[in-house]
Image: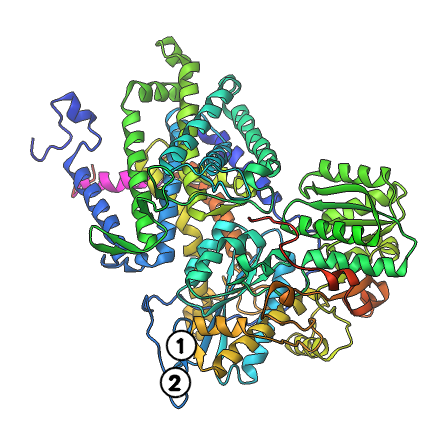
Amino acid sequence: MKTKYKWVAIVLALGLVLAACGGDDSADTTEAAAPATTEAETPDTTEAETPDTTEAEGEMILTDVGVDLEAGTITVGLLSDLTGVFSALVKPVVAGYQFQVDAINAAGGIHGLEIKLEVRDTVYTVDTHVQLYEELRDKVVTIGHSTGSPHTVAIKDQLAEDNMFAIPLTWYSGWSDPAINANIVPHGEPYCLESMNVLGFIMAQNPDFSTIAIASNAGDYGQDSAQGAKIAAEALGLTVVYDGEAKINAADEATLAEVVTGIVSNPADIVWVTTSPGAYAGIYGQSLAAGVVAVWSGAAVAWVPSFIGPDSAIRDAVVRDWIFGLPYSPWNADNPGTKAAIEMLKAADPDIAAFDYYLEGIGEALLIERILNDAYENGDLTRAGVLAAAKSLESMSWNGLWPDQSFVGEPNDIVGRTAIIVKPSITDLEAGGSGVEILDPAYTSDIAAAFQFDETCFDAFG
Amino acid sequence: MRGRPLLHTRYEADQAILNTMTKKVMVGLFLITLVLVPFGVVPGIGFLAKSDWLRLLSTVAIFVIGALGLNILLGVAGQVSLGHAFFMGVGAYVAAALGGDPEGLRLGFGLPMWIWLPAAGIVAAGIGVAFGPAAVRVRGLYLAFVTLGLVFVGDYVFRNWISVTGGAEVGRTFPPLEFRLWKEEVPLIDFASDGAWFGILLTSEAKTFYFLLAAALLFMLLAKNLQRTRVGRAFQSIRDRDVAAEIMGVDEVGYKLRAFGISSFYAGVSGALLASFVGSVIPSRWDLFLSVQFIAIVLIGGAGTVAGVVLGSAFVTLLPRIVQDATFWMQDVVIAGDSFLARVLDIFVATDATDFGLINTLPGTGPGLSVFQLNQVVYGLLIIGFLIFEPLGLFGIWIRIRNYWKGWPFTY
């Protein structure tokens, strides 16, 4: 029997290697080492199933789950991809989040209550996401971060049941849809409007452009962006010479080759590609080698500074051709919000390497701080109270770190319409920045401004 | 006969599923414990009544069904397969297409579970049998690679057949676990909401757990029974020596096809239940790692035994949670104190960026394994360890303990 299993062991070893190889296709991003003082918690099994409402001494503060007035803590759950395909981007987000929470706590917290984060690694798997939500649901007052669109959709019914909300780390335009929005607090410009803004900006600079090639991943990320590009192309009078919407599968070289062929054989003034960073650079590099000359853009998630790092063979071409519209301010932005964030990061870790995703996490933490503060001032730190505070937050300002936003009203009122237009910059990278030069710190194209949000640009989840 | 449990005077008694009193008592106690788990009244394991643990136990039940299928193929009939995840995916999407919301974005006919659940198994079995002619021609390592191909074919189809699967990175929703006679408004029995069964108030997690427990028990019974039938004996003879089996008159090709069919049926049902239980799944769920997990279940638990499958499923499903909680506990100890234990544990966990740790749960910081990566390493080590030191798996360890006490106080 023993010898019969020998080859099974070999196959399994191979299988594990293959499974491990399939992991990270989100390109080699510059991952910075940053300290974080996460406070881990052993799960509390003594907590009652239906907690009573408590009153604080002196002040009348209603609480239920996730707030312990005696211990002075408010617990917030983070469902983050720390090992899966987007971990290279999400780890700095969560690190920034934790730094900001530490800073908030050091400055007195929420009226003396300390924010505690319960971070869980979802591995970008929907069932793990749901399972970990289940683990957190007895412990937290709300979900301060949720990586992934299908993952966040999968917990929306439970969120509604528990009177909680989630801040999704995706810019899917569907989040503004009333059918989903009740327990979601989306932020920033969605992919769809990002396309409208960036293409509007490019056309304002180059009025003689007349053609565009579009290619994208399948799914809410790629296709929301591609749909936005098509809406913008029509409004701007651009002819779509190649439509590769949903054609890209980052894990499949053949699909990249097909898209490259499409782009090369249909010359366009603008190439709009929305995919993962690695696939984006691959498509760009091959097209460049085939002699394609165009302005390149796409959803900003594809951008990572390593493409213009000292080891990059395409750095000069990238600086010449690429342009993006970020939903948040980059490292070198000249505004009080970003400056304060970077000062805080440098105080926490003097050696921190510039990477814009830290700032994304800081923005999310500041949003949670504001919501919890409002809920406290309303005297209601129950889950329902915190949800109500989030949904009545009419004007939130990050002092420029993110564009100001409202969370109240119909979809047209809450959808983000502002982009920070940037292009890659070696000078900025070498000066210790995140490698971009800001062309416009707050740009809204006419198309994005006029866009009527009746339904999501791309319906992925029905 | 009292005191001589292994002396059977009738063939039926010898072949009984529970052939000794000890086994009957043990299984009975185990079942009573499981039934009581959602009430949190079992001393020592009261925490299992919490909703997240109940969900984990429900997942164990689903994995038991899937692993029983692979056990029939790998453990009983001796045919290795890396394609188990593919058949689970097939089952899941058959369930989604038949039971899915007709008003939804993706294909769905809104049929009740008593149609989509068996259909998930039957279609998967059909594909398993259709694939058989290619599989029965090869053995061992070659069979492993042929079945490995299925996972990648499946990956392509699942990613691109958007009208059924929702496509890569998006996925689709699946019909909920509930009983309807036909398409009536209110389901006869639903597991999605809290409510009373026979006057006892149960949470939705408890209801789901009971349903999946019952399903797993049914499939365990069928699998156990299969092993003592003509078909089961034929499978075992092929496993032990296929040439000899053929000489004895066992139709090798026919029985291998049956093994693939039955195994795929189990996989299909398990996939459908898993997808329905989670609610929405993206196509990459049915990847090679899932197949490897199932092989790990069978080998760690003990190939060829039903009890081993249960042990293996519980082990593989609960391991990530146990590793996670253990990591958090170790971090707490390290952060809290200057004790000797804290210093020892400090080697294993990182508490801040400057701290070295084998396990590092902190985001954005330096080297160290995450909980998930640590799990993968542990699977690999355990598979190798069990194959070398304990080929009968956890079940083999149990046999040793049992044999020790059988002869106690004598060594043999």
Residue placed under numbered mark 2 in the picture: A56
Image vertical order of residue B307 relative to residue B256, above or below: below
Farthest residue, direction right = A208
Image vertical order of residue B224 relative to residue A455, above or below: above
Query: Nearer the N terminus, badge 2 or badge 1?
Result: 2
Numbered tag placed on residue A341 in the rendering: none
Tell which subunit mark 1 falls on.
A
In 3D space, how far apart are the residues under numbered discs 2 and 1 (Cα atoms)? 9 Å
Where is residue B63? Give x, y as percent.
Answer: 40, 41
Tell me if B345 is positioned left or right of A358 in this view: left
Q: Residue at x 53, y 37 (%)?
A: B107
Farthest residue, direction bottom = A58
Label 1 SS: strand
Residue placed under numbered mark 1 in the picture: A63
What amino acid is at disc 1? Thr
Q: Residue at x 53, y 85 (%)?
A: A108
Image vertical order of residue A81 relative to residue B405, above or below: below
Q: Nearer the viewer, residue B217 or A409?
A: A409
Which residues lie in the magenta part? B394-408
Image vertical order of residue A356 relative to residue B394, above or below: below
Q: Is residue B258 magenta?
A: no
Q: Residue at x 72, y 49 (%)?
A: A226
What amino acid is at disc 2? Ala
